[in-house]
Image (cartoon, coloured by chain):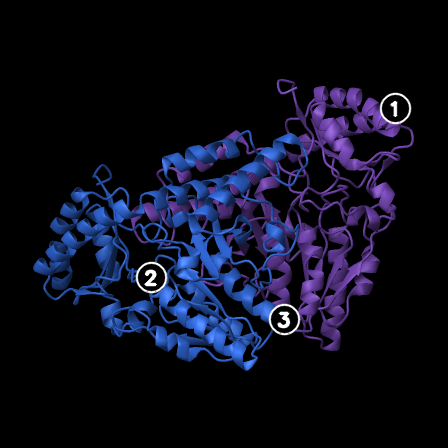
Chain colours: A blue, B purple
Amino acid sequence: MTTMKAYYLDHAAATPLDATVLAAMQPYLEDEFANPSSLYGTARRTRQAVETARHQVAGLLGAKPTEIVWTSGGTEGDNLAVQGVLRAAGPGAHWVATAIEHDAILGQVEPLRRQGWPATVVPARPNGLVDPAAVQTAITDDTVLVSVMLANNEIGTIQPVAEIAKRLVAVRADRTDRGVKLPLYLHTDATQAANYLDLHVARLGVDLLTLNGSKIYGPKGVGALYVRQGTQLEPLLYGGGQERGRRSGTENVAGVVGLGVALQLVQGTREAEARRLLALRDQAWRAIQAALPDALLNGDLKRRLPNNLNLTIPGTEGEALVLYLDNAGLQASTGSACSTGNLDPSHVLLALGRTAAEANSSLRFTLGRSTTEAAIKHLLAELPPIVQRLREL
Amino acid sequence: MTTMKAYYLDHAAATPLDATVLAAMQPYLEDEFANPSSLYGTARRTRQAVETARHQVAGLLGAKPTEIVWTSGGTEGDNLAVQGVLRAAGPGAHWVATAIEHDAILGQVEPLRRQGWPATVVPARPNGLVDPAAVQTAITDDTVLVSVMLANNEIGTIQPVAEIAKRLVAVRADRTDRGVKLPLYLHTDATQAANYLDLHVARLGVDLLTLNGSKIYGPKGVGALYVRQGTQLEPLLYGGGQERGRRSGTENVAGVVGLGVALQLVQGTREAEARRLLALRDQAWRAIQAALPDALLNGDLKRRLPNNLNLTIPGTEGEALVLYLDNAGLQASTGSACSTGNLDPSHVLLALGRTAAEANSSLRFTLGRSTTEAAIKHLLAELPPIVQRLREL
């Protein structure tokens, strides 16, 4: 079994570190180890590397370098965005999230409510898209933050962030007219979107945007948060004052260099790669529909990341599907890999109106850079008999 | 100039990544990229790597693996310890720190005071040591946390943590007698101590202990926080529930593997390395005293890390000394490298009773694994003429 060719179809859980990215990181894992805050020449070089990466990321977002804050990953970015804005606004400030956000957002709702910051969670429609009008309706005069992910990690649906941003412009104008002084910021988690979508922050109309190295063929343990100039943000981590006081801690030099190069690579190839994967993904979906006519697609087929296929296969159990597929040389997921040992049904699928049984019969394939037609052929050969065997058990 | 041999004497600011550590990390920067929370076989391998590293770190601290929480570094560890304990205790809980803590501790004092958690900062004695009785005196019935670093990053003084721990045992017993139910935890930042001192948490008597990869010849951007079982800790980062809910976010697999191996290496050689560096450090200090009789040692000579030499050289300016020494092939520091572009006099030296002028005339050498007699000879040849030149300017 161990010599069998394995096809990795779980790129939403983790991506391999690109060889070019690792090569760019390598000097900073070896000779170039100086603390960027030191004064001598070798430290000026590591400082330069950190700032070059910052320019690179800023350029890809259409942002200023000073608007990029390095983090330790997507979870920290999401927590810094939400807690940073709420703590800066003071207790009682309200925020809005959607029911299909990542746990790094939704996991903050109850603890922050206990700490004095109430939230409204806006439902998603059955197709996995959020209604901009519903988001607007949830906004009160106490709301300082709206958080809507750019693309969902489980079902890949692409949220109407720019449309929500337009509604926020209207809300802000109305507030100004009425003398309501509270700021109102829009945050988007672009962790899963960065490989395939435009991240230009002005076109999106967002004030904060989360990036994560480990989902874009970059290193684990590093990320970035775009914070529009003027955004009132309280740090999560206090200390040496790095990142203009917004995120203290010695910079992960190799990590941020890797993040910069990784983002450049995925953004540089995103349109061609999206077309390539869309064709493979749609081919897979059509063939699965033919072989398993009762399989249900979770989330809208059109407004969806090109690499995502999330299915409910009635009469099966997602975890068993994943283990049988692994045994057949195919790596897939039941949904989010981020909830360790959590066997509760996916909150995203429940939000779409799936039953708990349907949610537990679900399977996520996420294609990526290494995926070719061979993987799809193997998938199409292996999945139907596995489903049949599991249904017979 | 660029071909001149350079001697790195700033190991408290950053350490090179050990080649053995990098070799241990390498598989997790290449083929072994799976998200440890995924279900398939390759993910069980990365999960195993994360847990092996956790056992390794726990073993070196005399702790249980479940008591180790991975972080993104020393700053996050210190912030999770302080904010985690205070937020779990609720607003109004009080904490105690010393005046010579790292900014990752002291930088929390004012923001947390504004958020409802007052602190008392205990002064240090002129020799850079904290008086355990003064720490005890600062404790009130509202105190939930005392934070005292194991060894100081600027002057290397080794604090009487175990003695403070004994006093806390008495305070807790007295509280129990009087029916005061609030917990009282002891945190120590062992970031600088880990290369040379015993980290056994029971012998130290601490409830929380911060480690940082980048100061122990491990990777930047990764650390660990020991959290004694039963400690009430609110997370900083909410999300997928990794680290038993105490610190969400996909694990930095390569990073934690590196941290485990790095800690094993430094703890395995710490006694021999301490003896070796103590001899070199004391040799340097005797020779500098002879050459520059008015040089002052900052901090106690005996209760001090063996690799640290922090001097005030009257009539000079620390930043100029660092730049001239860099030009002469010697990398040193004015104190902490962690306060980016901060030219304020060191809060540690001020806490010892140095004047602002004396603090600004200070220079820190921190020896390390690569330091041999050649570096000390070069230092002794270069420093006196540089001091003379600067005094003549």
Identity of the residue furthest to the bottom in this view = A178
Mark 1 and mark 2 residues within 8 Å of each other at the beta carbon: no
Compared across the picture, whether A5 is left or right of B371 comes to left
**Amino acid type at image mark 3:** Ala
Closer to the chain start, of discs 1 and 3, is: 3
User: What whole-number distance in Å separates the C-alpha atoms at marks 2 and 3?
Assistant: 35 Å
**Amino acid type at image mark 1:** Ala
- Front residue (pair A117, A204): A204
Judging by the rendered image, the residue that carries numbered circle 1 is B291
Q: Is residue B209 above or below residue B6?
A: below
Judging by the rendered image, the residue that carries numbered circle 2 is A152
**Amino acid type at image mark 2:** Asn
At x 42% / y 60%, what residue is drawn? A189
Q: Nearer the viewer, mark 1 or mark 2?
A: 2
Q: How many marks?
A: 3
Judging by the rendered image, the residue that carries numbered circle 3 is B89
Q: Is residue B182 above or below residue A7?
A: below
Pinpoint the chain carrying mark 1: B
At x 49% / y 57%, what residue is drawn? A77
